[in-house]
Image (spheres, rainbow, N blue to C red):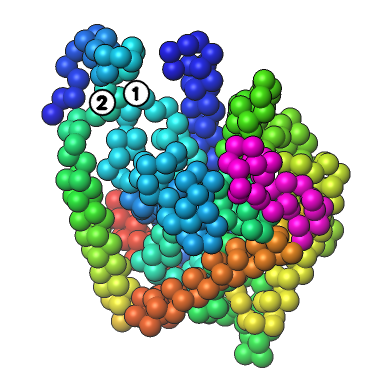
Amino acid sequence: MAQVTDWIKHLTTDVDAATEGIQVADIYPAVGQEWMWLTVAVVFWLWWHVGTATGESEEQQKLARRRPGTNDYKKNITEW
Amino acid sequence: MTDGLGALTTIFTEFYYWITVVLMFLIHVGFCMYEVGASRYKHHQHTLMKNTMLIPLVTVTWFFFGWWIYWAFPTGPGLAPSIMNESAALITDDSLFSASWYVPTSNLMAVNLGDHISGVFWAAFLLFSWTAASIVSGAIIERITTFAFGILAIAIGSVFWTIDAAWGWHFDGWMLKLLGYHDAYASGVIHAIAGGFALGVLAVLGPRIGKFSSSGEPRNIGPRNPWFVAIGLFLIYTGFWGFYAACNIPIFDLGPEYGMEGVTFFTATSIYVTPTTLSGITFNFLMSLSGGLLAGYWVSKGDPFWTYSGGLAGIITASAGNDLYHPLQAMMIAALGTYIAYKMHYWVERRFKIDDAVGAVAVHGYAGVVGLIVCGFVLWGYPSSGYSVGSMWVGTDYAPINPLGMFIGAIIMFGVLGFLPGYILAKILHGAGKLRIPREVELAGLDYNIMESARKDERAVG
């Protein structure tokens, strides 16, 4: 996946023989496979939303069924 | 970047924006402290998490599509031709600054030795996005689900404010060309829209339980930790310096940019590529802060919460024209905006039973709108863009700054791109049963489970 294996070689190799000092600019791994990473990221992103929304809803419904009083939280205040 | 001066200019600009991002991070720290300070004990941790989690939610979506929207939409589309390609369509061709550069798979959206600007510029705008979402966050504490807030944060942070930035902040924006819109430090582009969005959400979400008596009289659920609020607002002021800096281009030779033959004129510019100075805006930032603090202290009779908020409202009001105002103008405009925002907050609260927990709609929304309208009068006749001289892109002139254009701009920011989307999205979430937490949870406290668990741990440990 390495895009660069020798910095000196990379920085001294011009992309265009007519234009001195222009090297391959994108130096991150897996250049050209950005769509794959994007797809993985979007799937992760959607999964996260669904998962956390479900968890939040379940937890709140459970608490709502217990019906704690308005001031019950004061019994749960811990020391610093 | 092969010559010394070019390299210095590029690296300086890269570092400049990088620093603004670090400074602007303090805005978010401030908002977190401020919101937690304003909330009640039993909701503290949830309030903190809600505002914290907008960071990844908005950041990721800003990478996915938010930044692309900014570069694609300056023409509307369909409202005014681009000065870059003369087309009124989406700017997705291969022209200069095309949105095609900023899709998430572009090699400019990564480490790229040929590009020192995209990342820091992306980040500076991202921090604006966080701010927009964070403004909404404060207004709706203690009763919204984290899921709903996440969706709303993405909507305001990565979609709606981005559209308004493309329309009214981009140097190619149709609002500059047709309306003469001018909003140098975002009275409308960030603040009015976020305030309007928050109001739209609040209209559907409803007040916190107990906020209004049975006869409809509002009760004051004031900040429970005034020290957090004070430090939070000081941090927001501090971050606002970075915000002002990020709205500028630090060094630019306007001679060739404007097509002035043989002229070299290096200056800092506003986001519209019109000349200003960091020195000048420093006058105006501090004078508008002072005007807001003075008015806030006076109108609230020394209430600390509103005095601090007044300082912020003051800066926000004067921000639209702070690239050009005289400092004394900035101060008086700031005081006027703060006064109106305060009065409007309580009028709207009583008249429409709107429970804006931190006064965000007032401080950002109403003050932002006032700032835009006043700017239209005070800067009446100034060019909205340096390109209006027509020497660079002949045939596409810009309207000068004017009161009517700024008034329409304020309606677009607060109403069309702010209130309406907030209201509609909140309605959809409400319809799906996902907007508001259960009544029992609101009464018990959003932190009930986590506090109970901590208490059990404490007992077990002894």
Residue B455 is situated, as x and y percent measured from the top left of the image, at 35, 59
Q: Chain of mark 1?
A: B
- Residue occupied by mark 2: A27
Q: Are marks 1 and 2 in contact (CB under 8 Å)?
A: yes
Label 1 sits on residue: B113
Which stretch is magenta? Answer: B377-403
As helix, strand or loop, the secondary structure at mark 1 comes to loop
Amino acid type at circle 1 is Leu
Q: Residue B412: which quarter of the image?
A: bottom right
Q: How many numbered marks are there?
A: 2
Which numbered circle lies on residue A31? none
Residue toward you, A50 or B417: B417
Q: Residue at x 86, y 44 (%)?
A: B328
The image position of residue B353, as x and y in percent, is 63, 81
Looking at the figure, which quarter contains the N terminus of chain B?
top left
Crowdedness near tag 1: few (<14), some (14–19) or many (≥20) residues, C-alpha within 10 Å? some
Q: Is residue B332 above or below residue A67?
A: above
Which image quadrant for residue B458?
Answer: bottom left
Image-based side of A64 in relation to B198, left or right: left
Q: Main secondary structure of the magenta part?
A: loop
Magenta span includes B451: no
Residue shown at 26%/22% (left/top)?
Answer: A24
User: Residue A46's spot in the image, x, y percent?
Assistant: 24, 60
Q: Nearer the viewer, residue A71 or B80?
A: B80
Q: CA distance from mark 1 to mark 2?
A: 7 Å
